[in-house]
């Protein structure tokens, strides 16, 4: 925001944020603490901090013990430990047989040609969750009001419940838009399902 506002061609009163998947939660969190963001759109939103704050204390403490020890190793080697999830050298031609649940959807995108990239390993570092385990990014989402929020999800998206839960916590003005026949990953790249007109209209109306 500091940088955008320094540009001659940017109107400081017309800056919005759009976040997809985990960045949807980050966009909401940024708007909750920075009133210079005048309107927010999320698509296929994930609340990453919800992962680290939904455990019981024993599970959380065990996770943090492992992460804390890992930090020593990361410091000594000069780089964080990282385990890649998806193929490194080339996409697969078909899905692995042992996939179940939501992993099928993730691998359909990141493991196959559709969304594979050598730099998209699909994992956090081994110590990344430490930063998300002590607080919730979205505790103050209602403070975004009266700035507007548009949350987009798919009717068959595995993440739909996350958008619905966070939508209930947000204050007006807000809108939840459900795309028919859209999975979570469809809202990454399926231009026949991403509601571009809806997003454009929202920003044109609220950043005028």
Image (cartoon, rainbow, N blue to C red):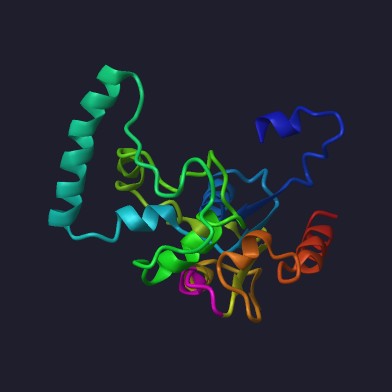
Which contiguous range is marked in magenta? 156-162
Residue 103 visible within the image:
yes
Quarter occupied by residue 74: top left
Q: Residue at x 38, y 72 (%)?
A: 101
State left or right for residue 8 relative to residue 112.
right
Residue 159 lies in magenta, yes or no?
yes
Vertical order, 101 against 106 (above or below): below
Instruction: Work out which quarter of the rendered image holds the N terminus and state it.
Output: top right
Residue 32 lies in magenta, yes or no?
no
Residue 143 visible within the image:
no
Image location of residue 50, percent across then percent down: 37, 58
Q: In the image shown, does 125 or 135 lie closer to the viewer?
A: 125
State left or right for residue 115 relative to residue 104.
right
Number of marks present in the image shown: 0
Vertical order, 203 against 30 (above or below): below
Q: Residue at x 55, y 67 (%)?
A: 184
Vertical order, 4 against 61 (above or below): above
Q: Residue at x 82, y 37 (%)?
A: 10
State left or right for residue 160 relative to residue 201.
left
State left or right for residue 190 relative to residue 77.
right
Q: Residue at x 40, y 49 (%)?
A: 85
Image location of residue 14, percent across then percent down: 79, 47
Instruction: Work out which quarter of the rendered image holds the C terminus and state it.
Output: bottom right
Image location of residue 23, percent across then percent down: 55, 51
Q: In the image shown, does 136 or 161 lie closer to the viewer?
A: 161
């Amino acid at each position: 925001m500091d940088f955008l506002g320094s540009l001659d061609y940017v109107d400081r009163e017309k800056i919005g944020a759009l976040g997809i998947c985990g960045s949807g939660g980050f966009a909401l969190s940024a708007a909750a603490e920075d009133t210079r963001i005048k309107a927010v759109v999320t698509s296929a939103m994930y609340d990453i901090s919800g992962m680290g704050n939904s455990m019981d204390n024993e599970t959380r403490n065990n996770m943090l013990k492992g992460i804390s020890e890992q930090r020593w190793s990361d410091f000594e080697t000069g780089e964080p430990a990282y385990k890649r999830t998806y193929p490194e050298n080339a996409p697969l031609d078909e899905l692995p047989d042992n996939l179940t649940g939501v992993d099928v959807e993730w691998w359909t995108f990141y493991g196959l040609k559709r969304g594979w990239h050598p730099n998209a390993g699909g994992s956090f570092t081994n110590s990344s969750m430490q930063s998300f385990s002590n607080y919730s990014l979205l505790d103050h989402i209602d403070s975004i009001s009266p700035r507007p929020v548009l949350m987009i999800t798919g009717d068959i998206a595995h993440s739909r419940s996350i958008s619905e839960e966070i939508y209930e916590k947000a204050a007006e003005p807000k809108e939840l838009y459900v795309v028919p026949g859209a999975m979570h990953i469809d809202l990454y790249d399926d231009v026949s399902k991403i509601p571009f007109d809806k997003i454009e209209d929202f920003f044109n109306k609220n950043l005028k």
